[in-house]
Image (cartoon, rainbow, N blue to C red):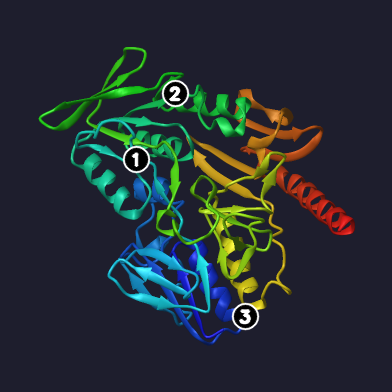
Amino acid sequence: MREVVVVGAGLAGVRAGESLRAQGFSGRLTVVSDERELPYDRPPLTKQVLCGTMSESDIRLAGAEDFGARWIRGTAAVGLDRERRRVRLADGAELPYDGVVLAPGAKARAWSGAVPPAGVLTVRGLDDVRRLRAAVDGGAREVVIVGAGFVGVELASSLSGLGVRVTLVEPFGRPLRALGGTVSGVVAKAAGRAGVVVRLGTGVRGFRDNGGRVAAVELVDGSVLPAALVVVAIGMVPATGWLTGSGLALPAGRIHCDERLFARTAGGAGAPDPGVVVAGDAAWCDAVRAADGPVALEHWSNAAAQGELAARNLLAGPAAAEPYDHVPSFWTAAFGLRIKSVGLPGTGDRTVVEAGDPAVDAVLVAHYREGRLVGAVSVNQGRLLSAYARRLQDERRVGRGNKTAAM
């Protein structure tokens, strides 16, 4: 293998580049990114960077320029020709490859209704946070956030801490709903104590403008919320449109890969392509699955672990490749709460409070499916999660051993 192309310069792509060199790859390594920025860490954007407690230089990914890659920044990949082994770029260039790492990440989901007026933003990258902070510094003191997932809750916490009047709108009834009702309730109460107005169970009908700039948000229940600024935080969309026509399997827009992170081809049995591996937010991996099938993850730890293993397996080849064996984990901080999870808590059918008390903002909730532990979430009880992570790891290994024995 003499030429490897990594598409995506987020955490998964950078970890893949580091891993390639660590495994002894000495050929040409090219990293393609549609952003002009040097690689940076995303989790601090909606928290420390927005609040001003971390600078842009603080979030640069250490080591990103130390593994001897050719960097192509500000130019998107627009096609993958697997027969000729070429990655096509927006400027017309083609990059030959012997192996390619697909780590394109995701984009913020845009508002799906009529084109919104100025002042309606999404937040995903560094440029987005710059615009949001500039608007707040410029006098936008009344902000409506649409969507109470992780990004929406983090933004609400950060902006309220900056003295902004924040209304958080969640049409599906509760914030961070994937973590279960107990944790959602703790978060909603903490948001209220911080001065955030939480509107649950009603969606957005549209926006009112004044001279082409947003002035208010109309809710489905008839309410009208004044707003100098609106942030739409309704999830992410995998950045995989450019792979249409590549012959790869793209369920729900994500890149399907086997347990060893080799991309599956479309149709038939979905045989893996030994020259294409996948990592990060855009992956739909057979090794990360619930009872109903693979589960997409947009977590920091998952991107880091997949990036490292994808590169290692690409060099090793399918015969010597290792299965992905990482227990998912995630953490965030909002409204004075430190929230952590392990496993796949959103996939259970029963939750049990096993430690702490939600009334005092300290609780651990275990998630089970058919009596088997599938995940756990803690609020200000993170020290207790390691035991649950070990249990999940043990169950994964037992399950893999049973599968191998059956074969």
Task: Give yes or no for contact between labels 1 and 3 (Cβ–Cβ under 8 Å).
Answer: no
The residue tagged 2 is 171
Task: Give yes or no for contact between labels 1 and 2 (Cβ–Cβ under 8 Å).
Answer: no
Looking at numbered disc 3 in the image, what kind of residue is underneath it? Gln
Identity of the residue drawn at 45% across and 35% down: 153
The residue tagged 1 is 110
Count residues near mark 1 (Cα–Cα under 10 Å), then give few for <14, some for 14-19, many for 20+: some
**Residue 289 or 351: which is nearer the viewer?**
289
**Residue 212 or 57: which is nearer the viewer?**
212
Q: CA distance from mark 2 to mark 3?
A: 47 Å
Is 185 situated left or right of 235 in this image? right
Relative to 277, say whether 347 is above or below.
above
Q: Secondary structure at mark 2?
A: loop
Task: Give yes or no for contact between labels 2 and 3 (Cβ–Cβ under 8 Å).
Answer: no
Is 103 situated left or right of 164 in this image? right
The residue tagged 3 is 23
x, y percent for residue 144: 32, 29
x, y percent for residue 375: 70, 40
Relative to 260, say whether 109 is above or below.
above
First in residue order: circle 1 vs circle 3: 3
Quarter containing the C terminus = bottom right
Q: CA distance from mark 1 to mark 3?
A: 39 Å
Identity of the residue drawn at 51% across and 53% down: 281
